[in-house]
Every structure is written in C-alpha cells, then in structure tokens.
Amino acid sequence: MKQENKKSVWWKKAVGYQIYPMSFQDSNGDGIGDIRGIINRIDYLANLGIDFIWLNPIYKSPQIDNGYDISDFRNIDPIFGTINDFQELISKLHKKNIKLIIDLVLNHSSDQHYWFQEALNSKDNPYHDYYIWQDGVANTKPNDWVNWSGASEWTYYPQIRQWNYHIFNKRMPDLNWENGKLRKDLLLTAKFWLDMGIDGFRLDAISHLKKMSFNISMKSMRESGQDPWAVHTNVPGLENFLKEIKYAFSGYNIFTVGEASGITPGQASLWTGENGYFNAIFELDQNRHDGYDSKKRPKGNIQAFKKVIFNWETRLNIFGWLSPYLANHDNPRSQQVWGDNRSDSSAKALSLILLSLKGTPFIYFGDELGIGSKNFTSIEQITDPEAQIAYQKTKQEKGNIAKAFTDIANFNRDQGRTPFWWNENKNAGFSDGIPWLGISDGSQGRSAESQIKDPNSILNFYKKMIQVRKSSPSLNQGLFYPLSLEQDSTVNFLRQTNSQLSLVISNLSDTTTQIELPTSIDLDNWLQVIATRPTRLQRKMSLGPYQAAIFMKRVNG
Ligand code: GLC
Ligand code: CA
C-alpha cells in the first residue's frame, strides 16, 4: 500500500495469521490449497478477528521446497492460481479490513530461474555474477561448509567447470548480493508486489545474504571456539544490504518482519522497531527446544520456551520489536511441542500466552482449532526435502533404516504443514481430491464448523482472546515484566501501561502446580477478563493442568 501522509504504525496493535497456502483450502480438487480457496474463506478469517495474513510463497516455482525455490519472482505459480486471483484476494481482504503480507525470498532463487539458466551458459554471461561461484575441479569442494541438513553447500557444474554456492538445497542457488545490479533487479521485483497493493513482507532467511571469505573453514571456526554457522549468518557488512532494502521500502506504509536466524536480542534492538531495518523479527531461539531429547518427539520444553521468550521480551521492552509465535511451517504444531494434542485446555492456555506477549503476534493457521502434529508411519508419506536428505544421510552413514526413519518421523517439517480441518466431511473439507499431504489425526468433531457452534471450543477461545488483546492497551502496548523466573512450567507475567495493568498466569504442564505471587502485587480490584476456567486470584494458588487466566485493573500512571 502506498504511503499517503505520515506512516502509521498499524502493525503495532495488529494480530497476524500465517497461512500455508498448500494446506488451507483447495478449490479445484487437485489436492493442493490455492488462492481461490483462501478467497472462499475470507469470512472465516474476518470472523476470527485477525488483522493481517502472512502468506507463504505463492510465486512460480518447481516446488522443490514448497515455493521457497522461486523460478519467477513476478508470477504466481499455476497450482495456486493467477495474478488476477491474487489481485482479487488483496481487494477482497482489504474490503474486510484484513491486510496481506507475503514472503520475500531474497537470498536464493530456483535453479530453474532464467537468471541461473543464463548463468550456466558461460562465465561471461551478464547473469553469471548474479550467483556465487568458485573455479575448481569435480571432487574438490572449495571448502567444508555444510548446512543444517548436514549437506555440502557446494554443487559442481561440469559445463562451466565451477562450483556453485547454496546455503539450502542445491536446487536453490544463493544470489550474489555483492552484485549491485542483482540487488537492484531483486528490489524492483519487491516493489512490483508493493505497487499491486500488498501490505508488507516476511523476509525469508534474511540473515544469510552476506557470506564470509570462502578461505575460512567451518573447522577452523570450531577450533577457535567460534560458531561455525557464523560463516554465513549475520556476517559484518550485512547491515549495508539491509539498509538498502529498508530504503527501497521507505515510500510504503507496510509491515516488514525478518526471519532473523542467529540474531541476538542486542542486535535486534537495532534491527527492528520504528527506526530499524525491519519493523519486527522472528527470533529462532525457541526452535532449538533446548533440553529435550532429540530422539523423542519434541515435547515438554515449556521451561526452555519460557527462558527464551522472557529473555527476548525483556530485552526488547524499550528498544526493538518482536513478533511472537508458537509455531510455523518449519516446526511441528504447537500443541505437540508446547502443549498436549489431546487437551483443549492446553491449546487455549497457549493462545492466552501468545496473545498476551509484547510485539506483533502471529497465529499459525489451524492452531486455533488445536490441530496436532501428524504421526507419519513411512518415509514415503514425508515430502519435506530437508527430512528426505537427513534420512538418506543417516541411512548411508549408519546403515540402519529403522533408526533413520524414527529420527525423521520424530521431527520433520511436514508435521505442522498438514491441511486445515474445515468440516466433518471427507478430508476434513480441505479437498475433494487426494490431499497432497495427509490430514493429521484427531480432526473428528474438532473442525472449524463444529467448533464455531461450541461456545467452549478452542476456536471461540481464540476469538475471545484476540478481542481481549485488541481492546486492552496493556496487552497490545504495555511493557513486559516477567514474574515466574523459576525453572518450572508456569508462565506468569505483567503487562503495563500508564492506565492499565494485566496479570497473566498459567500452568503449561499436565500436573497441578502451585504458584505464589510476589508481595509487590496487591491483590485488590482485579477483574478476571478471560480464563481457561474460572480462577480465583490469591497470593498462593494452585493451578490445574493447562489452567491459565488474565486479570486486569486500572492504575494511575
Ligand atoms: C526459511 C523458510 C523455510 C525455507 C528456507 C529456505 O527458513 O522458513 O521454509 O525452507 O527459508 O527458503
Ligand atoms: Ca487446488
């Protein structure tokens, strides 16, 4: 959206909702969610009360990484629809006062992109330098850099006798940000979508645009006690690229949120906020799930979650801005990681926490129904390329197929990407065809259609909680003060403005737990505004499994 007068900071009080388009709603029976499907569900979104949507990539793509491998930055992939459909989506969302932000992938393209195909023709081709190359011979990689899947970041192209650099999949070559023409071309494609009327971007993999010298090995980094990922994460000089991006967006009244892998809270206070490179960032620390056994399904890490969240919220209290979230398309569902798939109360308690945090929160589609992660029983059911690579690697190295599968089944990105539960019909109303990824278990009786009718449903709790947040200055603007600093599963904190104080208490475990409020909190005049079940406020109180509540009162600032 073009800027009219002064820029508003609409995003500060807004609640976001992430839609994974392949799994939201299929409109034509091919088993894949599409733009028309989203258009058909705008009433549902308006009714939920969210302010804006983040849509994962819908650009033209060979779909090696479900759309993050883009072969045309200015087109929509036919599986999702057409540019006309997309324009219709923007205008129909705007009519309902819902804004739309989309992924902007600046770090890499697909190997099928015209630029890369040209680059492969010869070293003299003008597009050759749009990518990152090292001369060499087959079998001798330029260095030992590997990515998170454990795969080398180099692929040899015999036709030009060069190694190509890619942080992610080999079908997703990194773009060469050192090349000014490339930067200009890329940022023009971003403007193309802004001029169409979108309201912002989620900047994918944005901390990787700059790389260290290829002479530096990961081994030497490790040996000198440095973080080996630092070779391609938040490398000094990155800030110049980020400033250029910020400048390109300066005429637009938009919201930008960066996927900030490896960024510390100290850096984020400069990266974000009204004067930052972006308005907000997603921290990725919470996804390390510290303290759990990676051989088991990730679960029961609420203590680690609390530590990460309290740290970020406190550090960004005055300077900087966070986008809190419970789950996204790269992680298992929040009900599995932080709650209990079988418990409605845990989904409610989690929403109460998420929507009480400081920042611009994002709800991951389906969390408002309590959709659980999927249990996969064979490797063929898993499409996530990272999971497939990791599976092949363990299989080759350890020779143990069963172990390779269990590791992957416990943690893969498809677990949280399963289709939405619309109704009680076949395929939960997601598609008349065969869904590209199986529906997760437990949909019966818990579809959106059923939950809308049930006043005590998770969905209706989310709706209420969204309204509570939006109507309470303390929750949508107040400062954050952590209370429960102990190593336990209670997450308690205060949010405060000059005129309002909120007290948030919760027990995010499946056993009854005692909490004790500090004597600095006076117990008079609190009003309970929302709770998973009626809760009486006392100095010492016992909270049942997944019990959570918010109390509010007026204060004189
Ligand atoms: C981000 C996305 C992830 C994708 C990767 C490469 O981490 O969230 O889904 O695979 O970038 O684009
Ligand atoms: Ca479809």
Image (spheres, rainbow, N blue to C red):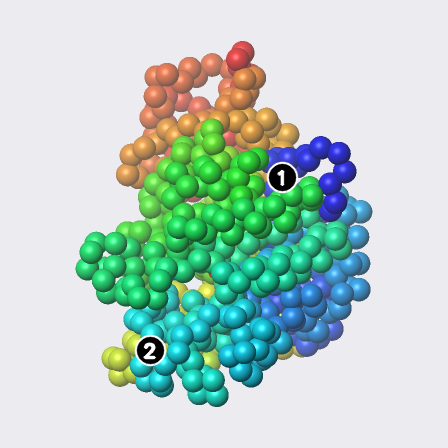
Ligand 1 neighbours mark 2 (CB distance < 8 Å): no
Asked if residue 307 lies left or right of residue 450, the reply is left
Please determine whether, in this image, residue 173 is positioned above or below residue 268.
below
Q: Is residue 372 visible?
A: no
Give neighbour class at mark 1: few <14, some 14-19, many 20+ (Cα, 10 Å): many
Check the image and name the residue furthest to the left: 223
- What residue appears at the point 69 percent right and 65 percent down from the top-left corner? 74
Q: Secondary structure at mark 1?
A: helix
Q: Which mark is residue 11?
A: 1
**Rendering coords of residue 243 (x, y %):** 54, 46
The front one of 378 and 36 is 36
Residue closest to the far bottom: 159
Whether 455 is drawn above or below 113: the answer is above
Q: Secondary structure at mark 2?
A: loop
Residue 94, percent across and down?
77, 47
Name the residue at 41% across, 32% down. 314
- What amino acid type should be assigned to the residue bearing mark 1? Trp
Residue 131 in sight in this render? yes
**Residue hosting label 2:** 141
The crowd level at tag 2 (other Cα within 10 Å; few <14, some 14-19, many 20+) is some
Contact, mark 1 vs mark 2 (Cβ under 8 Å): no
Q: Is residue 479 above or below residue 554?
A: below
Left or right of residue 522, residue 113 in this image: right
State the image coordinates of residue 334 (x, y, percent, origin top left): 46, 53
Task: Give the residue type at disc 2.
Answer: Lys
Residue at 39% in and 71% down: 153
